Amino acid sequence: MTTTERVAGQNREQFPDDGAVLLLAPSVGDAERDACTELLAHHDAASSRVVHVLYMESAIERYRLIESQLPAHPAESAVVAVGAGGVVGERGPDPPAEHYHVQRLTDPADLTGLGMALSDALGEWAAVGDVTLCFDSLSILLQYADTERLFRFLHMLTNRLTELGASAHFHIDPAAHDEQTVAQLAQAFDDQVRVDGDGDRIVEG
């Protein structure tokens, strides 16, 4: 995509159809969550498999989000819950294990372990159907990895996503970082979706 479009908050048809998307949105308020769920719903959820990387939200909270907000539930979902933040607020019964798989990584700075976990999950599911990745969030990961190291990780991961034909979106709060950091990380992605506090979006290629 070579043009820049301003998109009304509820027009999900304007999201990029595939590839790896950098979702630039404020972490406070509902705009980021609304854009995330619409990106997930943008694909054929009923026949897809979704991998979620969570640094703050718990696996139970994400399961409730999928159940309550997606019009069609994915065939299967997997959560990689990273660090202590991935289990904060975890309450309630476990989701059905046959459709919702949870893996915990204790060290948020272990990009090697994270990369291996994602490669296994994405590769296994891409062999049997469509797969989507939601990575929430790069802003948290930047507390544990410097920009250059994170860029190398993202470059390898997005190349792997391209090989598998998988779609993905990666959350980042642009207000939490300087413009140079965001610009460097953005080079690893096919498109950018910039969301303001009112939910309006600018799709950039």
Image (cartoon, grey):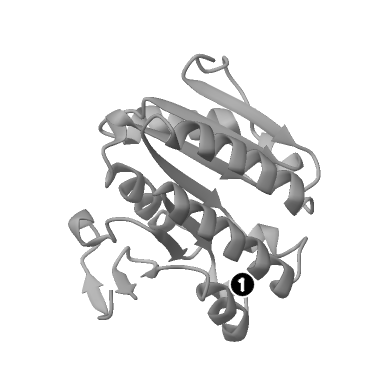
- Quarter of the figure with residue 153: bottom right
- Identify the residue at horizontal 75%, vertical 43% (top origin): 83
Front-most of 115 and 40?
115
Does residue 12 lie above or below 82 as drawn?
A: below
Q: Note whether residue 27 is visible.
A: no
Q: Residues within 10 Å of mark 1 (few under 14, many from 20)?
A: few
> Residue 82: x and y, percent?
70, 42
Q: Is residue 158 left or right of residue 107?
A: left
Q: With 15 as the anchor, is 57 left or right in this view?
A: right
Within the image, what quadrant is residue 47 found in? top left
Mark 1, secondary structure of its residue: helix
Q: Nearer the viewer, residue 128 or 135?
A: 128
The quadrant of the picture occupied by the N terminus is bottom left
Q: Residue at horizontal 54%, vertical 64%?
A: 172
Q: Quadrant of the C terminus?
A: bottom left
Measured from the top left, where is residue 16 in percent x and y?
29, 61
Residue 165 showing in the rendered view: yes
Q: Residue at point 22% right, 55% down?
A: 12
Question: Where residue 62 sits in the image (x, y, percent)?
Answer: 50, 35
**Left or right position of 182 against 113:** left
- Give residue 155's position: percent from left, percent from top: 58, 65
Identify which residue is drawn at 62% across, 76% down. 177
**Is 86 left or right of 194, judged from the image as shown?**
right
- The number of callouts visible is 1
Q: Where is mark 1, residue-wise?
A: 176
Under mark 1, the amino acid is: Ala
Q: Residue lying farthest bottom?
A: 180
